[in-house]
Image: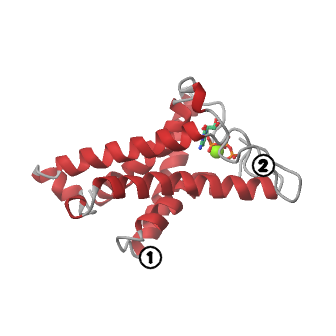
Amino acid sequence: MILLTYLYFMLPGIFANMMPVLMKKHWLWLARPVDFNLKWFDGKNLLGDHKTWRGLISGVVASIIVVAIQRWLMQFEIFEKISMFPYDQYSVWLVGFLIGFGALLGDMVKSFIKRRVGIEPGKKFMPWDQIDAAIGAIALISIIWPVGWIRSLVLVVFTFVLHILVRNIGYYLKVNKERW
Ligand code: CTP
Ligand code: MG
């Protein structure tokens, strides 16, 4: 039950994180690199051309929509019970933006670091690949709402476990080729 409240809180970020993958065959005109193909001092791509405006924008939009739905659902008692975030006290736009943009910012910061240490796009970087979005989302939502260290830690650990679990299930169902 407690884990459900954590999962519910993370939902906008989870959607934000999934959108770039789901949108791969759509909005081709927006599939331009966020880093404008710029290079860092080491001569390598800042992020890589796989980090696109399409991913960023579709993720933020998805997050805002999910938060709007969560805000609307608060009128029902069960949803109010599993809402650890007071959706009715903040702007849906702002909360959706902070969680969605935070998640994708975390992903981009991680990509930036991966490129600097020479890890190619798509190659593993445990545990950061699993928790980048959670850290980014927590960081940005903290601007308006105190998440707290304990809750942040639980969120990050839970995200990591969930990620590994989902990828393993996907691996056995042959949805993804890599186990994590
Ligand atoms: N993606 C995107 N735009 C973003 C973020 C991701 O289009 N802003 C796409 C990428 O092209 C990738 C997919 O979403 O195909 C999954 O992204 P992710 O797992 O974060 O990228 P990786 O391939 O692991 O790259 P990196 O090594 O930089 O983390
Ligand atoms: Mg990745």
Helix, strand, or loop for circle 1? Answer: helix
Residue 83 against residue 66 in the figure, above or below: below
The tag earlier along the polypeptide, 2 or 1, is 2
Q: Amino acid at mark 2?
A: Leu
Say left or right for 39 vs 111. Answer: right
Q: Amino acid at mark 1?
A: Trp
Q: Nearer the viewer, residue 26 or 139?
A: 26
Q: Is the CB of mark 1 within 8 Å of ligand 1?
A: no
Residue 76 point in image, percent of width and height: 11, 49
Q: Nearer the viewer, residue 148 or 46?
A: 46
Q: Is the CB of mark 2 within 8 Å of ligand 1?
A: no
Q: What number is the disc on residue 149?
A: 1
Residue 47 point in image, percent of width and height: 72, 49
Can residue 174 be seen from the camera position used here? no
Residue 101 point in image, percent of width and height: 49, 53
Q: Residue at x 68, y 38 (%)?
A: 50
Query: Where in the image, quadrant-wise, is ligand 2 located?
Result: top right
Around disc 1, counting alpha carbons within 10 Å, would you say few (fewer than 14), some (14 to 19), or many (20 or more)? few
Image quadrant in which the N terminus is located = bottom left
Query: According to the image, what is the colour scheme of the structure?
Result: secondary structure
Can residue 160 be seen from the camera position used here? yes
Q: Residue at x 72, y 39 (%)?
A: 49
Query: Alpha carbon of mark 2 to alpha carbon of mark 1: how far?
Result: 36 Å
Residue 116 against residue 144 in the figure, above or below: above
Residue 142 point in image, percent of width and height: 42, 70
Q: Which residue is mark 2?
A: 38
Q: Residue at x 10, y 53 (%)?
A: 77
Say left or right for 75 vs 105. Answer: left
Q: Nearer the viewer, mark 2 or mark 1?
A: 2
Residue 179 against residue 97 in the figure, above or below: above
